[in-house]
Amino acid sequence: MRRLALLLTVLSFIALPATARSRVVLLQFSDYHSHAQPFYSEGRAAQGGIARAIGYLAAERRKGALVFNGGDMVNKGSPAWSDKYRCAEWSWFNGIVDAMALGNHDPDYGAEVFNGCREPLHYPVLSANTAGFSASATFRAGGVRIGVFAVAGSDFPALVKSSGFAFTDRVAAAREIVRELRDRDKADAIVLIGHESTEDDEALARAVPGIDLIFGSHSHLKEELRRIDGTRTWFLSPSQYLTYISRVEMTFDRHKLVAVRGRLVRVDASLPVDRTIAARVATMQRDLEADPDYAALFQTVAVLKEPMTVEQLAAHVVEVMRERAGADAALSTASSFRQPLPPGRITMEDLRASLPYDNEIVVKEMRGIELKRLIAVSAARKGTDNYAYMTVPGAIADDHVYQVAATDYVANVSPVYAEFFKQARRTGLRVRDEFRKSM
């Protein structure tokens, strides 16, 4: 009996670490922007597609994964799917998505439409610094508690045009929510699911200790798992339009987070397809293309012999802006260029997907020394959505006066560049139209 008791004691110590350890899978997608159909991306045809994404996410959800949506499910003006169907897909994620962040484009059609979209959802829409929204939610998975919250980025007051949305300081809100999730809700890990730029995400991680993981969103960047410098916060960003889904595995030992692994899951033909959703999307797309209000968007406007990468597109567009405006230099932020153009037949809808914002060209006179400072500001933001693609003269004289063309977004909204373009002259020229004429 004494030997049996000793053996049982030894076995209990051996078994304890295994039973105390648990693993939780977290999945996140963001900035879907009504891209229901597969599309051309990263030199590959037929990437993305909501039927594939739902097939994969639903299967992982049945295995116990938590699934989050970083916001920006619609985009007024492009694609046409968004304008015709608006939030039709939001309820398709009922029973799959656990929580959604409020994105800056989600209110594009006004507060009344947004509230109608929100009403049938079985999952909460979160935003800690937006009036009228829940700040956070806590989920049990794998024997641990995962606290989740979202914030509206620093640029929301400028980007959200709909009335009825009021925003407060995101850092103060995050600090309070992190404290509540730890102290009140006893969260074992805290996750930010959206919706702000990568630069704001990194600044928030440094200003608010205690955030274990940030899922990137608003900047549309593709970034593998990394630690944010100067913090203990992990970061992973899945690009845009359901091109990728972020997947993170958190390992806990006695409720302590001890390991984080993550990767991006490509949404392509290798994923299982939800056939019901696929059939629904096919029918809706046929109806869209047959609708007299949208049919012209699907007619050929150009034919490309070679594909055009986002970088090539940006370089060409800013040169067209400079030329059409009669300027010496031109620039547009990386956020203006969203998709490459495939080889072959190009429709207006393809152009709208690549250049989704109907920006006007404006022109500002500035001295060479100021133009040099503008170039330096852009260079410091290489790799972010605030980086500006530019075409500039080869030699810039400090005292010479230059005509500099930009988009009205750069001049009126951008938190980085607007100071350079105060009282810029409007031209009446639209960037997308001028690019189309140049093809």
Image: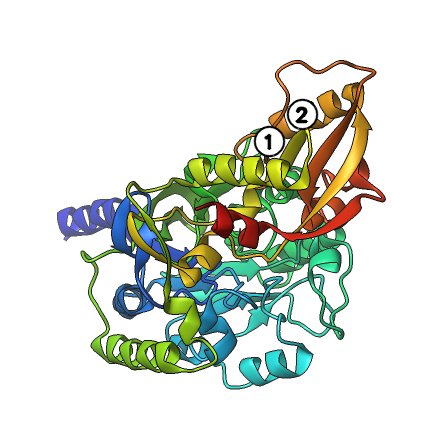
Amino acid on which disc 2 is placed: Ile
Amino acid on which disc 1 is placed: Met
Residue 257 drawn at (x, y percent): 44, 45
Task: Look at mark 2 in the image and give the residue it sits on.
Answer: 375
- Up the image or down, 58 lies above or below 246; here it is below
- Up the image or down, 4 lies above or below 68; here it is above
- Up the image or down, 295 lies above or below 339; here it is below
User: Residue at coordinates 42% horizontally, 63% vertically from top-left?
Assistant: 349
Task: Look at mark 1 in the image and give the residue it sits on.
Answer: 390
Task: Give 207 or 381, whichever is nearer the viewer.
Answer: 381
Quarter of the image for residue 294 reads: bottom left
Residue 246 drawn at (x, y percent): 38, 51
Residue 49 drawn at (x, y percent): 31, 64
Closer mark to the observer between disc 1 and disc 2 = 1
Mark 1 neighbour class, 10 Å CA radius: few under 14, some 14 to 19, many 20 or more: many
Nearest to N terminus: mark 1 or mark 2: 2
Q: Is label 2 in a helix, a strand or a loop?
A: helix
Task: Give 221 or 376, whichever is nearer the viewer.
Answer: 376
Horizontally, residue 266 falls left or right of residue 419, namely left
- Up the image or down, 186 lies above or below 387; here it is below
Residues at discs 1 and 2 in contact (Cβ within 8 Å): yes
